[in-house]
Image (spheres, grey):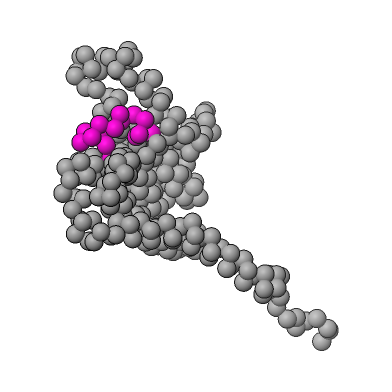
Amino acid sequence: MSKGVFKKSVSPVTEPPAVRYLLIGLSILVLAVFLVLPLVTVFVQALQMGLWQALATFSDPDAISAILLTLLVAAIAVPCNLVFGIAAAWAIAKYRFPGRSFLITLIDLPFSVSPVVAGLVYILLLGPFTPVGAWFLQDFGVRIIFAVPGIVLATIFVTFPFIARELIPLMQDQGTGDEEAALSLGASGWQTFWHVTLPNVKWALLYGVLLCNARAMGEFGAVAVISGKLRGETVTMPLQIELYYQEFRALAQVSAFSLAAVLAGLALVTLVLKSWLEWRYADQLAAGNRGH
């Protein structure tokens, strides 16, 4: 038997242990300083005057209005992006048409445009002194800018890539074989979508909805520009936190951090669900690859 037949397995990691431990320790330190410590500080500041004082924040009409408005905006923006995301992903993954690459670029546009710029653009297009804004206001009595409709539009703009971007790669990877098989067996277009396409992408879809909802509830820049910050009317939770914090009163500071703790708690829940969905999503992809 020639030499070298039995070779000792070589680890793909060539760095010495000291370097590996240094990199791991540095990563943990950076995460602790820039992520964990600020998160802990939010909860500590919220409870600095006691639990009951923190809970008293949620009896303030302004805080209640901000919470309800945030939930309302998310409840409208997320379903709109859900419909758009599925339609855009279906069109891009299943069809070839002129302008397809340009459509993908447009979907990514909110990732590169500042939310503040997006808010300013909506003011220029739909403000009360613009032709479109004046038409809605005079003929229908609907104010878009400095009102709830404008907040919803701005939120939809900054969040609409999340669902589409989760679905497009998966649909492209799966191809059209399953749908063609279902259609050849006599299924209608709706039956094919409901029983074939949707189950194949359900975990990616839930993952995108989760990220979209988290961004919708935490959006600040575009909403701050387009809302006018009218207390009790157009102030969402992030804006109410800023208003509380700018009062420079001890009770107001507690209220600011209490609302911030709610958003931080939602972020933690999102993180847990995100990790779970990633685990389920990975299993689904592995099963799909084995099936093919």
Q: Look at the picture and state if 14 lies above or below 187.
A: below
Q: Position of residue 187 (x, y in %)?
A: 32, 46
* Residue drawn 50% across the image and 50% down it: 173
Q: Position of residue 11 (x, y in %)?
A: 68, 74
Seen in the image, is 147 located left or right of residue 281? left
Q: Is residue 119 magenta?
A: no
Judging depth in this view, the residue of 247 and 7 nearest the camera is 247
| Image location (x, y in percent) of residue 155 | 35, 36
Magenta-colored span: 222-237
Task: Examine the image and state in which quarter residue 25 appears.
Answer: bottom right
Q: How many marks?
A: 0
Residue at (38% x, 49% y) in the render: 211
Measured as percent of width and height from the top left, residue 162 is found at 42, 44
Instruction: Say if the magenta span includes residue 225.
Output: yes
Considering only vertical position in the picture, is 267 above or below 244?
below
Location of residue 80 (image quadrant): top left
* Residue at the far right in the pictured view: 2
Q: Is residue 250 left or right of residue 203?
A: left
Left or right, 73 with respect to 11, comes to: left
- In the rendered image of this protein, does residue 8 appear above or below residue 270? below
Q: Nearer the viewer, residue 92 or 60?
A: 60
Can residue 71 be seen by looking at this rendering? no
Q: Residue at x 31, y 14 (%)?
A: 129
Q: What is the quadrant of the N terminus in the image?
A: bottom right
Residue at position x 41%, y 24% in the image: 121
The answer, for residue 213, to whether it is visible in the render is yes
